[in-house]
Image (cartoon, grey):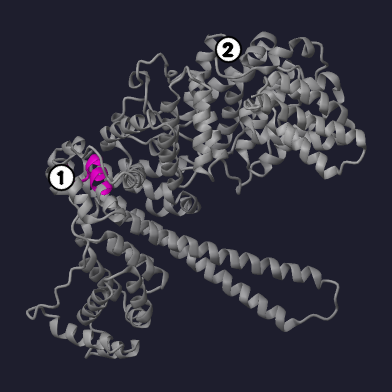
Amino acid sequence: MGGRRRQHVDDEDEIVTKRRRGLPLVDEVEKKLQEIIGKVGDKNTGSSIESNLEGLCRVLQDDLDKYRATIIDIIVGCAIYLPNKVTVYTTLVGLLNAKNFNFGGDVVEKLIAEQQDLLENEKYCEAQNLTTFLCDLGNCRVLTIQSIGEYLESFITAAFEENVPQVRTDWFVFTVLRSLPFIGSELAEKANEQLENVFGGIEKYLEQRSKTHVPILQVWRPDGTPHEQEDYLDSLYAQISVLREAEWKEKHIPRHYVGFDAVLQDALQHNLPSFSPPAHTENSTYPYPRVVFRIFDYADCPEDGTVLPGTHAIERFLIEMEIDWIIEKNCLSRKHCAKELVQFAQENPTIPMGYLMFETIFAQLFRLPQSPHPQIFYASLLLELCRLQATSYPQILVQSVELLYQRADAMQPACIDRLVDWFSFHLSNFQYRYSWKDWSDCIEKDSFCGSVAFAREVIEKCRRLGSYDKIIQALPSEFVRIHPTIPEIRYMLDDELEPGYHKATVFTKMFQERRDADAFLEELQHEDPEEGYNADDFAVFVTVMLKMAAKTYSHNFSALSRYQKTLKTVCDFHEKFQEVLLDTIYSCWKTNQQMMMILIDKLLKMQVLDCSQVISWLFDEKLKCEHDRQWTFEVLNTALEKLSRHIVSVEKDYKELKEKIEREKTENNDEEMEDEDKKAADLEELESQKEKLESLVDFQKNLFMDVLHKFTVALTDIIVKCESEGTDFHTPMFNWVRGRYCQVFLWHCRTLSKFSGPLSDELFTEGTDDRVLECFKQFLALRQ
């Protein structure tokens, strides 16, 4: 401890010594300033934060004239990117402002300019951090409370802008609510009129605000969890209201400025100007709304003296916000992240922090439309946390899995997919040991039930990650209904009674002789030239090829590449051959879903298969038996994403070419002689790229409309069938298909938002069943 304290003092002494020598390099001093300012408030320095602030303030005072701009930039950077130490840096600014009024004004001016710049660049999280920082400067006597009240009022005024998306105005209200725990007490005492105006505006806004978006973002259907899945604004407003009733008393925010009250109370204060948001444009994007995820309450925690804050306790929000920040800061290193989370838990021993950490991690993992970080990060982070706290965290994780399984029947398929991917990965690190019998109640349920899907797909994913025999040995005997099948190729053409036996013999010999692609094309020719190729012979050719390449993935890739010309020539002749190819892959590899997905993905990349044909095949009646499986939706999404990525690439090329032509036009504007041929060629290429892009976008629009139409028809058929039988249409199958339907909107929301007009005009018309149409309305509400 003493060594750490000496290190902190040594850092300050080094700057003082260099200043006395008059020899320091500017870059060295700036680097040292950044280091000591960035470290202030760290809890491993060996001395109190207040003592460190006093020492730092003395050092910076002497440097304000020479390094003013640098010091201000560093402090503003800390305000933006170190929100966990907001009260440390507001106190520092308060102490410096008390000694140098002009410096305080310069900091405030820089903060306001930086916030405006962040908003114009759509960095909303960082801009929120600055709002909180500016508000807390009122506690440190840098800004007048009256002006802070008016500043927050201007946010609420902005929330009532007309003809702008609700997600924009939501951000203004959320930003105000997020800042109130820091400044609410001072506002209530010294600017109560402004505070009442703020609350009045928020209440009015929330009353008229649409919450159509909430169901599509909920992890569970409303009847599937004991915890209310509140909209994030409603939840935070309820928490702030409870805090207000408690006279703004909370136990989590460290208020360092209290220790310097004697120094700060006589400081001159600045006025904070009103907030003026950047104008909305049709290209502006805003954060998606969220739904608050809850899995634990006080009854789930052990009776060890620690108490889980209530759902509407502000401490719950503040702690979750800090956990979110720790994860964001360390998202590239699971080890550093886990270490900081454990340290954070140790700093708050009166709260069952393990439960809040796991709840927050799962909240991020299940967040819709997308998780903030890759799923593998959360999986590895949970493993690391269990390793660091082996005596307590594994039990919390097991408890989490039990609760998630209990509610799986009401869980959105998109979240079940993520749960499956995480838990199968987790089990692969523990030899797949688990109390599988706890899931035995799902065995007799409908195959479309969430708990069945969860158990079945976890077992399938474990089979992919491990060995078939090991998984079968780990499972109880009653699980035979959902056992994975042996993942081997099905080859029937070695039986002489099979119709394709003789042709298979011919193809086998040709493969062994390494005949080229043209030879196979000749062999596949149909007797009737108009037919082009023989479909039955093509199926036999593909079957034999897959059989001979079945040993490894590499063998398969090699075979596909070697005979790409054969495959592509036949499939390009008529779309029915693509269906034959897909049917043959399914027939051969239906017991190995991973192999099927990899082969289809490879054929899409090779442009042998067309994504529209893959999608038509997936929705075909003969594949209906697979619609409860995860792999079918993965293939559907792969096909859609392949097209989207291709369009992004073409659009990038088009924009680069357009910018190049415009740049050359500007550079050559004053020149008399110009290469007219080159200019004409560039313009011709640009027009060609434009036509290609427009054609692809139109194809993409029609493809998405086809997919959504197929889902619409499937859901409508279920409703009609159930109503004709006099039964409730909310069957496991309806809920599952509807969940997948919503998942298309969520996974491809950015692309589909561009087509919302045509979708409304051509697909989701007045004739669409309202119970199906509501999914589309919920999707639209994410951006409108």
Dot 1 falls on a residue whose secondary structure is: helix
**Residue 671 vertical placement versus 530 (above, below):** above
Q: Amino acid at mark 2?
A: Trp
Q: Position of residue 558 (x, y in %)?
A: 36, 76
The span shown in magenta is 446-458
Q: Is residue 448 magenta?
A: yes
- Residue toward you, 739 or 208: 739
Q: Amino acid at mark 1?
A: Phe
Whether label 2 touches label 1, CB < 8 Å: no
Q: Quadrant of the N terminus?
A: top right
Q: Position of residue 743 (x, y in %)?
A: 37, 47
Residue at x-position 66% and y-position 44%: 121
In the rendered structure, the answer to whether residue 360 lies left or right of residue 330 reads: left
Q: Is residue 406 magenta?
A: no
Give the residue pinned by disc 1. Answer: 479
Give the residue pinned by disc 2. Answer: 248
Residue at x-position 82% and y-position 23%: 58
